[in-house]
Image (cartoon, coloured by chain):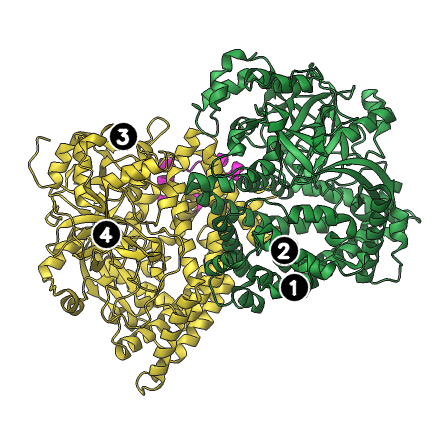
Chain colours: A yellow, B green
C-alpha cells in the first residue's frame, strides 16, 4: 500500500449517520490531535511527550511510503513493498535482491540505496495567515496562484536558511489551511535486511487487499550520517507482547491521498472521467509489462517492482471505483453536502459560502476540458520513460533556476533543489529495451488519446510509428550518463541546446504546451482552493464534525481497536498465525502465488507455529500508510501496517468501521522469523534493545 | 490463430510496388483459383479434380478455425487451440482435458463434443445478379438492405429445401459479389486425441506469433453420422516426406477477416476508433481474467480457454494496430487508392465510380457516431455473459420466428435455425461466479463508456452497483436449465414474459435500442456495399491486380514457398526440430511458459531429435486459418497451419513476403510424437492409411 495504493471492490455497509461522533475515524494532524475523542472513547490521554516521541520516531519514505526508527543506531523498519524500489535499483543481472531477499550480517555489509531519501518531521508551524495575506481579493486566479506560490517559496527558503531543515509548506483542507513542515533528511540509507518477496507478498495479487493474510511484509534499513550509523533519540521500543482483542492501537504514518472532503461535482468527475481513464491506462500497462516479463527471467527482473506497483494500483483503484459506482455511497455523500448547504443557507454568517460549490463546479469543468492533455503532456502519461523524465527536468531546470525563487515552477524552488538533484543524478540502472517498451507503449497511448491528426502528435512522432520513434529516442539519447546530466543541469539553455540530445529536444518540443496547460489547471486549482477554504470554515463552524484534513502524504495519527469482523455470516478473527500460513500454502498445493520460499519449508519445524503473523484494527488508513508503525498505549511498536482489506478501499471517500480494517504484521512474528528462519539473531537483539556481539 | 486472431508489432518492409504481379499473395476463391499465376510462378497447373479433392477435404470449425479430413473413417485434424473450446466445455472440476490432453485408445472412448458444428463446402454458385436484382436503384438504404436480406434468405431457404445442405449466401469483395455456399454439416464430432496444452502452446504468450517455434499445436477429432464414424470420400493422404526448402505448398482454410480493400476513410476509422477501443476492452478483460484465474486452480481452469483467446486476440491486434500506426503502410494504402481514383478519373466508363469513396466516407461517419452504442448494446460488449446471450437470443427468437423468413434479423432466417438451436441448447457448463465476474466487468465498462447519467444505463443498473446488479441477475436467472430454454424458445412472447426471468427482462429492456441502432448501422453498411461493388468493378477493369476478395471466414486457397528469411542480419531457417525444442526449454530453465510436460521429459531419448517440428512458408494467411492443412503439389498433407510470425500481422492490411511467414506443424513431427511420446501407434497408423488392430 504505497502512495499509488492497493485495492479490490466490494459492497460495504456505510454508516447511516453523517457525523461520526464516536468512531475511530480520522487521519489526525500531530498539532491538532483528537484528545477529546480519545478520552471519551478509550479513556486515553496522550501527553505532549508521548506525541512528540511518536512523531519523531516516524519516517517518511519519499519513494512513497512510511516507516519508523526502531533502534538507537538508526535502524528503520518499513514494508518490503516500500523498500522494493530501493531493492530493484541495486539489483542487477546476477543479483535479484527484490525476489531473493538480503541480509547484512555485519554493518560493513549494509548496502547503500541509490536514491532513497527519508524525512522525519521535526516541527509544524501554521502559516495560513501569511500565505493568505499574499493573495489579494481582487487578484485574478492566475495572479492569485502566482502570489501564493511565491509566498510559499519564500517561507520555505527562509526556514531552510534559518534551520537547515527541509521545509515544505503543505496545503491542508484542500486550501483551508497552510502549515510549514520541517524535516530532518537522511540520504545515506542502507539496506540491512529484506526477506524473499514471496513471503513478504505471500498470496500475491489474489490475496492483495484481502484478509485473513499471512505476510511478512517488512524491510529493515539503517540511516547513516557522516558514514556512521545515525544516533537516534526518538525510536520505538519493541513490544514482545503483541496485541490482544480490543486493544487500542495507533498508527503514525503518511496516508497519501483521500477524497473525503470533495464536493459532489468533484466526486462525479472522479467517477466519470478520472477513474475510467486511469484504470484503462493501468490495464494497458499491466498487460504490456506482463508480456514483457514473461519473455525471459531477466526481463521479469527488470520490470518486477514496476509491475508490482501497477498491479497494486490497479487493484486499489478498481476498489475505489467500485465505491464511486455504488449508489449507496454516492447518496450518502450527496446527503452530507445538502445538509451542510442547507445549514449554511439558514445561517446569516455562513450564507456567503453558498457560491463556493458553484465556483468549484465551474473550475472542475475547465479542468475536465484540459485534463487529458494535462495528463499526457504535463504528468508524462504520453512519455513513460525515465530518460524522458530526466530530459524534461534538465530542459526545465536550466530555464527555471535563473528566475527569482518565487516565480519558478514549484518543484524548482530553492528549498527543493537538493532533493530534486538527488533524484536527477541517481545512478539507478536504466535498460534500453525496457525504456523503449515503456516509451513505445505510452506514445501509442498518446496517439490513441489525441489522434494521429493532432499537430503536436505529428511533431512528436516525426513521421515514424510510435515503436520506431521510441527506439530512435532511447538509442539516441546520452542521458544514461549521470556526469552528462550534471554538466547540462549546471549549464545554460544554450549549452543544453548545443548538446542536441534527441530526448531533450522532444522535451523542449512539448514543453510550451505542457507549461501552458499547467498554468490553466493551476489557476483553476487556485479557485477551488479558495472555495474549499470557505467550505472548510463553514463546516468547522456549523458541524461538530471531525476536524481533520484529507490525506496529503504528510504525517498523521490514526487510532482504532484491534478487532475482527463478520463477513458473509463468518467471524473473521483479529489475528492469524504461522500455522495458518502453512495451511493456506498447502490448500493451494504450494503453487504460485501461494508457494513458500525454500527456507520457510526447511525451517518450519523450528518455528513456534502459534506465533501471530498479521492482525487487523479499525484504524483509519489509506495508501501511503504502508510501513507505518502500529503502537500501543505505551507507544511501543506492536506491528507494522502493510495493507487494508477490500472493504477498506472506499475509505478514500468515506470512513466505515463495520468491516473495513487496517492490516499489520505482528511484532512477534518479525522476531520469530528473524531468529528461526533467517538466523538473524543479532538483528533481532538490536530490535529488542539487547546488546549483541555484532 | 482463431478468427479472433493472434499478433505483435514490428517494422515490416513493405513492397514498394502496389501491384503484386508476381508474388505469393492471395486468399483465392475455389471457383476462381489463380491458375495463370501458379503456372507462371511455379509451373503448376492444378486440375479440377485436384481442386475439388482439396476443397472437400477441408473442414470449417464453426467455433472459429479450420481443419481437414485425414482418414477414410472421418478423422479430422485441427489445432489444439481450435479444439480448445470443445476441450474446455467437456472438462470439469476433476478433468482438465484442455491442460492435460486426451487420448481415446478405442473408438468407444472417443468423447462427443457438446456443441461443435463442422462444415464442409460442397458447392459454390454465383448469385450476384439475383441478389442485386432485388435491390432497385430508387430504394433508400434501409429498404435496399431489407430487400437484399430478403432475397438472400429466400435463396438460402430454397437451396436448403432442395439439397438438404446448409446454405449461406456469402458477401464477397465488400459487396461486389454474392455467392451461395452449400455445406455438408457434422454435429456429432468426437475428440480422439489432444496433447497437453503446454506442448501445443510451448512458449506461451511470449512465443505466440513468433518464429522459430516448436509447437505440437494439433488436435484430432472424428466425425460421426448415425452414431458411426463418417465414411469420407475426400480426405488428405498423409505425407511422410515433410517439406524441403523452396517447396511449393498450398493452404486450404478459412481466413477470418482482412481489410485490404478498405478505403482510407475506413482504415482511418479502424486506426483512430476501432482498434483503440478494442484494445482497451481486451486489456481490461485480460487483467480481470488473470486476477480471477490466479485465485485458485479451479478458477484458472474455468477461465482457461477464454483467457487464451483474449491474450491471443490482444497480441494479434497490437500487431495490426502497430501496422496502422506505421506511416509507411498508410502511405502505401493512400498511394494505391489515389492511383485507382486517378485512373478512374481518366476513363469515360469508370468515371462514375468516383463518388463511391465519398459515399463510403459519409456512411463511415454515421457508423462512427453510432459505433459505441452498437458495440455495447448490440454486439454485447456491455453484457459479457453467456447467460445474457441465451436470454437475448430467446427474447428475440420468439419475436422473430413468427415473421416471414425474409423479414427477420438475419441470424433467425429459416436456413440458419438448426445451427442457432444447436448452440442455444448447448449443455456447456456455466459457472455462477465466472458469469458474475464477466457481467460485472462488462456492466462497469458500459457505465464507463456511456456514463452514469445515461437513462438506459440507469434502467439497466436499476439503482445498484454493476457488481451487485450482476450478482442479482446471475443468481436470479433460470436459464442454466437447457429444458427451460427449449420451452421458452418454443413459446410465444407472452410465455416468455410470464417466466419473469430477470436476464430475459434485461435483454428485453435493451432490445428496442439495440434493434434501432442495428438498423442504422445495417443501412450504412448497405450504402458501403453498393459503393464497394462499384469500386471493385472499376478495380477489376482498370488494374491487372489480384482478383481475390478480402477474407470472410469462407474457404480459400493460398499458396507459397517453404522459405526462411533474414531478420536483424540473422538467417532464420525454414524449419525447426525436436532438438531445438529441448534446447529452448533448457535455455529458460524449464520455467513456465517454457516448461515441458513430464511425458516429454521422460521420453526424450525415444525421439528422433532431428525430426522437423515447425516450418514456415510465404502462403497468405490470417486468423481463422488456424488448423488449415498445408499440402504439397500432390495434394498430400505435409503440415498444419497454427500461427503467423510477428511480421505477418500486417497482412490484415497489405501482403508482404519479405519476412511475413505462415507457421505449420510438420506432418512428420505429428507421427513421431504420437508413436514415441503418446504411445498412440494405432492412431498414427490410421493417419498413414495403414490397417491397425484398433
Q: Nearer the viewer, mark 1 or mark 2?
A: 1
| Residue B441 magenta | no
Dot 3 alpha-carbon crowd within 10 angstroms: few under 14, some 14 to 19, many 20 or more:
few
Q: Chain of mark 1?
A: B
Question: What percent of the width, then of the height, locates residue A347?
Answer: 31, 86
Residue at mark 4 to residue at mark 3: CA–CA distance: 26 Å
Q: Chain of mark 2?
A: B
Residue at mark 2 to residue at mark 4: CA–CA distance: 47 Å
Q: Main secondary structure of the magenta part?
A: helix
Residue at mark 1 to residue at mark 3: CA–CA distance: 61 Å
Q: Give residue B168's mark.
A: none
**B493 or A359, which is in the foreground?**
B493
Identify residue for label 2.
B375
Are the residues flagged by discs 1 and 3 in contact, CB closer than 8 Å?
Answer: no
Q: Give residue A601's mark.
A: 3
**B413 or A403, which is in the foreground?**
B413
Identify residue for label 1.
B495
Question: What percent of the width, then of the height, locates residue A237?
Answer: 11, 47
Question: What percent of the width, then of the height, locates residue A607?
Answer: 19, 34
Amino acid at each position: 500500500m504505497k502512495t499509488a495504493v492497493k485495492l479490490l471492490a466490494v459492497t460495504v455497509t456505510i454508516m447511516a449517520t453523517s457525523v461520526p461522533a464516536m468512531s475511530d475515524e480520522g487521519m489526525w494532524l500531530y498539532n491538532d490531535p483528537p484528545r477529546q475523542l480519545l478520552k471519551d472513547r478509550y479513556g486515553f490521554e496522550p501527553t505532549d511527550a508521548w506525541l512528540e516521541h511518536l512523531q519523531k520516531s516516524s519516517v517518511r519514505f519519499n519513494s512513497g511510503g512510511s516507516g519508523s526508527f526502531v533502534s538507537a543506531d538508526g535502524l528503520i523498519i518499513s514494508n518490503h513493498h516500500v523498500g522494493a524500489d530501493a531493492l530493484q535499483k541495486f539489483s542487477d543481472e546476477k543479483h535479484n535482491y527484490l525476489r531473493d531477499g538480503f541480509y547484512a550480517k555485519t554493518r560493513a555489509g549494509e548496502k547503500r540505496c541509490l536514491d532513497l531519501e527519508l524525512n522525519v518531521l521535526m516541527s509544524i508551524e501554521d502559516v495560513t495567515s501569511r500565505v493568505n495575506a499574499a493573495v489579494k481579493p481582487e487578484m485574478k486566479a492566475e495572479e492569485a496562484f502566482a502570489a501564493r506560490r511565491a509566498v510559499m517559496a519564500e517561507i520555505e527558503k527562509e526556514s531552510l536558511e534559518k534551520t537547515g531543515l527541509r521545509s515544505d509548506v503543505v496545503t491542508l483542507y484542500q486550501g483551508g489551511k497552510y502549515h510549514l513542515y520541517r524535516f530532518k533528511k537522511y540520504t545515506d540509507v542502507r539496506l540491512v535486511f529484506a526477506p524473499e518477496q514471496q513471503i513478504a507478498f505471500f498470496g500475491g495479487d489474489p490475496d492483495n487487499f484481502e484478509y485473513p493474510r499471512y505476510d511478512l511484509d517488512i524491510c529493515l534499513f539503517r540511516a547513516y550520517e557522516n558514514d556512521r550509523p545515525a544516533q537516534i533519540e526518538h525510536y520505538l521500543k519493541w513490544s514482545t507482547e503483541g496485541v490482544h482483542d480490543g486493544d487500542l492501537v495507533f498508527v503514525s504514518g503518511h496516508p497519501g491521498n483521500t477524497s473525503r472532503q470533495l464536493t459532489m461535482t468533484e466526486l462525479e468527475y472522479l467517477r466519470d472521467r478520472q477513474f475510467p481513464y486511469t484504470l484503462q491506462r493501468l490495464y494497458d500497462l499491466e498487460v504490456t509489462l506482463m508480456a514483457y516479463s514473461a519473455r525471459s527471467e531477466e526481463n521479469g527482473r527488470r520490470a518486477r517492482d514496476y509491475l508490482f506497483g501497477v498491479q497494486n494500483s490497479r487493484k486499489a483503484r478498481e476498489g475505489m471505483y467500485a465505491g464511486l459506482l455504488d449508489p449507496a455511497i454516492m447518496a450518502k455523500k450527496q446527503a452530507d453536502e445538502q445538509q451542510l448547504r442547507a445549514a449554511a443557507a439558514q445561517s446569516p454568517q455562513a450564507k456567503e459560502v453558498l457560491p463556493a460549490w458553484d465556483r468549484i463546479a465551474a473550475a472542475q469543468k475547465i479542468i475536465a476540458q484540459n485534463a487529458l492533455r494535462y495528463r499526457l503532456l504535463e504528468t508524462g502519461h504520453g512519455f513513460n520513460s525515465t530518460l524522458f523524465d530526466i530530459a524534461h527536468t534538465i530542459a526545465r531546470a536550466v530555464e527555471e533556476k535563473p528566475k527569482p525563487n518565487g516565480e519558478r515552477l514549484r518543484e524548482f524552488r530553492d528549498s527543493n533543489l537538493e532533493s530534486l538533484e538527488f533524484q536527477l543524478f541517481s545512478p539507478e540502472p536504466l535498460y534500453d529495451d525496457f525504456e523503449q517498451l515503456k516509451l513505445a507503449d505510452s506514445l501509442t497511448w498518446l496517439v490513441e488519446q489525441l489522434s494521429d491528426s493532432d499537430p503536436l502528435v505529428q511533431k512528436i512522432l516525426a513521421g515514424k510509428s510510435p515503436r520506431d520513434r521510441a527506439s530512435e529516442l532511447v538509442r539516441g539519447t546520452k542521458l544514461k550518463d549521470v556526469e552528462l546530466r550534471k554538466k547540462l543541469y549546471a549549464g545554460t539553455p544554450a549549452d543544453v541546446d548545443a548538446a542536441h540530445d534527441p530526448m531533450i529536444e522532444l522535451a523542449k518540443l512539448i514543453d510550451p504546451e505542457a507549461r501552458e496547460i499547467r498554468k490553466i489547471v493551476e489557476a483553476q486549482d487556485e479557485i477551488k482552493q479558495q472555495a474549499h477554504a470557505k467550505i472548510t470554515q463553514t463546516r468547522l463552524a456549523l458541524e461538530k464534525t471531525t476536524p481533520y484534513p484529507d490525506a496529503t502524504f504528510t504525517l498523521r495519527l490514526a487510532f482504532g481497536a484491534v478487532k475482527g469482523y463478520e463477513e458473509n455470516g463468518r467471524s473473521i478473527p483479529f489475528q492469524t498465525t504461522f500455522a495458518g500460513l502453512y495451511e493456506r500454502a498447502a490448500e493451494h498445493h504450494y503453487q504460485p502465488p501461494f508457494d513458500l520460499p525454500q527456507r520457510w519449508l526447511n525451517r518450519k519445524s523450528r518455528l513456534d507455529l502459534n506465533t501471530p503473523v498479521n492482525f487487523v484494527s479499525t484504524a483509519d488508513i489509506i495508501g501511503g500508510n504502508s510501513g507505518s508503525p502500529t503502537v500501543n498505549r505505551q507507544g511501543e511498536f506492536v506491528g507494522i501496517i502493510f495493507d487494508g482489506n477490500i472493504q477498506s478501499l472506499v475509505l478514500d471517500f468515506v470512513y466505515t468501521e463495520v468491516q473495513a480494517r487496517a492490516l499489520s504484521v505482528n511484532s512477534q512474528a518479525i522476531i520469530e522469523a528473524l531468529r528461526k528462519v533467517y538466523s538473524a539473531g543479532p538483528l533481532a537483539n538490536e530490535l529488542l534493545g539487547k546488546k549483541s556481539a555484532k
